[in-house]
Image: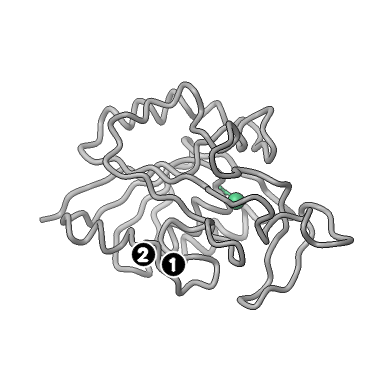
């Protein structure tokens, strides 16, 4: 068994123009992502899903601004504007995303004290989301990743995918980046070295 799946990362209102953590051109990928959803036999979506006052929000760290960093127990954490709060419109999928075919929606970042960029592991890189087990049990070994943002949730998901024994391809055309201080170039390099196919 070597099934393929499309993993659609965080195509949510808050990551699109007008959203709380808008990624430039984030909404431009939606038509292409919809086409890919139509082509794949298996589709998994992820949804960034934070409780209010999540520890990754700059607003809960006195004196800190969004896009600065802080030291957490698990390492350095970038601080973000409040975004993707559970149940809000900002956390909803983009209105044009054709998500009904998805067989699984993985929600991540719901533990107050730890952020989760990756669809596989939280930012301590050890707490699993359950996605690897789900894919293995279903005989899915070959993943194509698209979505937002290239240099955070897409990249960490792809890195963890290869680390967990999956084949991973990132379709860059169907992704958009935040690109904080050269983060896009650095993580593309890291992905290529780790064995992620950048297409
Ligand atoms: C993301 C920052 C914070 C992402 C999620 O989806 O790339 N980035 N939360
Ligand atoms: Zn988040």
Q: Quadrant of the N terminus?
A: bottom left
Query: In the displayed structure, does residue 145 sit left or right of residue 2?
Result: right
Query: In the displayed structure, does residue 20 sit left or right of residue 175?
Result: right
Residue 147 location, x and y as percent? 48, 40
Query: In the displayed structure, does residue 39 sit left or right of residue 190?
Result: left
Q: Where does label 1 land, which residue?
A: 194
Residue 37 location, x and y as percent? 32, 31
- Residue at 61% across / 67% down in the picture? 113
- Residue at 68% across / 66% down in the picture? 77
Whether the residues at callouts 2 and 1 have beta carbons within 8 Å, the answer is: yes
- Mark toward the start of the polypeptide (2 vs 1): 2
Circle nearer the viewer, 2 or 1: 2
- Residue at 48% across / 54% down in the picture? 108
Q: What secondary structure is found at the residue carrying circle 1?
A: helix
Q: Where does label 2 land, which residue?
A: 162
Residue closest to the far bottom:
73
With respect to residue 148, does 76 lie above or below? below
Structural distance between the alpha carbons of marks 2 and 1: 7 Å
């Amino acid at each position: 068994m070597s099934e393929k799946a499309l993993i659609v990362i965080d195509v949510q209102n808050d990551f699109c123009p007008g959203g709380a953590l808008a990624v430039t051109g984030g909404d431009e990928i939606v038509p292409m992502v919809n086409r890919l959803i139509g082509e794949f036999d298996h589709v998994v979506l992820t949804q960034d899903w934070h409780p209010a006052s999540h520890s990754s929000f700059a607003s809960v760290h006195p004196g800190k601004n969004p896009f600065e960093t802080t030291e957490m127990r698990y390492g350095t954490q970038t601080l973000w504007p409040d975004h993707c709060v559970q149940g809000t419109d900002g956390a909803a999928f983009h209105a044009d995303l054709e998500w009904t075919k998805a067989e699984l929606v993985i929600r991540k970042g719901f533990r107050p004290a730890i952020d989760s960029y990756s669809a596989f592991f939280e930012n301590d890189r050890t707490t699993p989301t359950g996605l690897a087990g789900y894919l293995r049990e279903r005989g899915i070994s070959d993943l194509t990743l698209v979505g937002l943002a290239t240099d955070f949730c897409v990249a960490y998901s792809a890195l963890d995918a290869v680390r967990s024994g999956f084949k991973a391809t990132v379709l860059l055309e169907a992704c958009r980046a935040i690109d904080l201080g050269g983060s896009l170039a650095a993580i593309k390099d890291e992905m290529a070295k780790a064995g992620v196919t950048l297409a």
